[in-house]
């Protein structure tokens, strides 16, 4: 991911599991610089990039998952079929 950090560093959103906390807009490299502070805010943290189509899930037990966007297929229900 370091090779393409500039591509992945466009606009991202930091989301925490506590509903009263704000969603923060930033850049990925800035979030990584202070990742310990970001994850200390609440138990579970998500870093979402609508532009690049990925989400990084950081769970309270230290587990990290990365989800990447695949081809999006429209549901027949959405088309009214």
Image: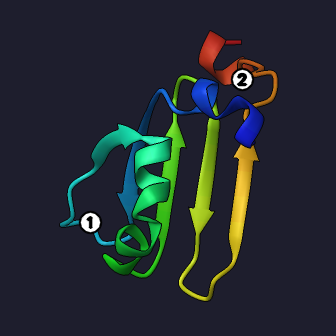
Q: Are marks 1 and 2 in contact (CB under 8 Å)?
A: no
Please tell me whether mark 1 or mark 2 is closer to you in this view: 1
Residue at disc 1, secondary structure? loop
Residue at the (18%, 67%) spot, across then down: 20
Residue drawn at 71 percent across, 18 percent down: 74
Residue 41 in the image: x percent, y percent? 31, 76
Query: Residue 62: which disc?
Result: none
At label 1, counting other C-alpha atoms closer than 10 Å, the crowd grade (few under 14, some 14-19, many 20 or more) is few
Question: Residue under circle 2?
Answer: 75
Q: Where residue 39 appears, x then y in whole percent?
A: 42, 73
What residue does disc 1 label? 19
Residue at 35%, 78% (x, y): give it.
42
Determine the CA span between mark 1 and mark 2.
Answer: 29 Å
For residue 9, side relative to residue 24 (left or right): right
For this view, does 80 lie left or right of residue 2? Answer: left
In the foreground, 78 or 25: 25
Q: Earlier in the sequence, mark 1 or mark 2?
A: 1
Above or below for 34 versus 79: below
């Amino acid at each position: 991911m370091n090779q393409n950090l500039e591509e992945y560093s466009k606009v991202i959103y930091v989301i925490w599991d506590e509903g009263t906390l704000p969603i923060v807009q930033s850049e990925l490299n800035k979030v990584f610089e202070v990742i310990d502070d970001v994850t200390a805010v609440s138990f579970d943290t998500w870093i979402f990039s609508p532009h690049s189509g990925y989400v990084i899930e950081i769970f309270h037990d230290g587990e990290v998952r990365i989800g990447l966007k695949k081809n999006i297929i429209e549901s027949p229900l959405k088309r009214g079929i």
